[in-house]
Amino acid sequence: MTAKLHIQERQIVVPGQVLATGLEYLPSKGTYRHNDTIRANRIGLVQIDGKVIKTIPLAGRYLPKRGDTVVGRISDVLISGWRVDLHTMVDSVLSLKEATNEYIKRGEDLTRYFALDDWISCKITQVTSQNLVDVSMRGPGLFKLEGGTIIEVDSQKVPRIIGARGSMVRMLKKATDCNVVVGQNGVIWIKGEPDMEVIVIRSIRLIEQNSHLQGLTETIKEFLEDLTGNEVE
C-alpha cells in the first residue's frame, strides 16, 4: 500500500482517527499502529518529524522530568532544606547543598535564605521511582523570584509560549522590557512596569487560547505592537 498522510502538522485529532497509512510512517507518543495505519490515542495536536508522527495533548497535568526548569513556591522549611510546591501531585525538595554556594551552619535559621511562600526558579535534578523530586538552584537562570507577578498556564501550552528556540518569550521580553521566567510546569513569573506586566499576561493568555493555530507568532507580534505602540522586530 502506498504511504499516505491523512492529516496536517498541528491539526487537532481525536482518539482512533487515522493519521497515516503505510508502513513507512512510524508511531510515537500519543499514537499507535493498527494494521497498516497509524491512529491517535488521545485528543491533541499532530506533530510530524520526518516519518515519525506523534500527538501533543491539548491539556494535562505536568509530569516532572529531569532537566526541566520549573517555577516553584516554598511550601515548608525543613531541617535540611525546603519543600517546594511545583503544582504537581508529587513532593519536591531543595536541599541545603543545592540551594546556595554559601556555607550554612547546622541549626541556622533557613528562612534567612528562603521563607514560606517565596518563589524560586529551579531545575529538576532527579525524579525517583517513588515520585520524589529533587531540585537545584545551582546554575544559570536559577534564582529567587522577588516581586513581579505569578500566573499559571496549562503546562502543555508551555512549548508554544516559549516558542521555537525561545523566540516567542524573547519577543515578549523585548516588546515590554519585562523579565519573564517560564517554568515547564506551567508557572510563569513576570516582572516589569505594572502596565507592561499586564500586556505580557494578556499576550500569554492569547497564546494559550490559540496555541493550535498556525501563524501565531505574527498574531502576537501585531498584538504587542498595538498595545505598546512600538514596532516589534
Image (cartoon, rainbow, N blue to C red):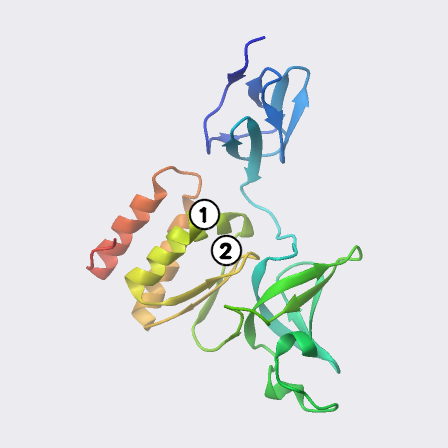
* Mark pair 1, 2: CA separation: 11 Å
Amino acid type, mark 2: Val
On the question of residue 163 being in view, the answer is: no
Q: Quadrant of residue 85?
A: bottom right
| 112 with respect to 202 (left or right) | right
Q: Residue at x 58, y 22 (%)?
A: 25
Q: Percent x, y for residue 19?
A: 55, 23
Q: Residue at x 38, y 37 (%)?
A: 214
Tell me if mark 1 has few (under 14), some (14-19) or many (20+) residues whose alpha carbon lies within 10 angstroms of its own: many
| 8 with respect to 59 (left or right) | left
Q: Percent x, y for residue 186?
A: 53, 57
Q: Which mark is residue 160?
A: 1
Callout count: 2
Question: Closer to us: mark 1 or mark 2?
Answer: 1
Q: Percent x, y for residue 201?
A: 39, 60
Q: Quadrant of residue 180?
A: bottom left
Tell me if mark 2 has few (under 14), some (14-19) or many (20+) residues whose alpha carbon lies within 10 angstroms of its own: some
Which SS class for mark 1? helix
Most foreground residue, 202 or 111: 111
Which SS class for mark 2? loop
Most foreground residue, 110 or 202: 110
Q: Quadrant of residue 76?
A: bottom right
- Assign the N terminus to one quadrant of the image: top right
On the question of residue 136 being in view, the answer is: yes
Whether 168 is drawn above or below 137: the answer is above
Residue under label 2? 153
Amino acid type, mark 1: Arg
Q: Residue at x 31, y 67 (%)?
A: 177
First of labels 1, 2 by sequence position? 2
Q: Which mark is residue 18?
A: none
Whether 62 is drawn above or below 215: the answer is below
Q: Percent x, y for residue 178?
A: 35, 67
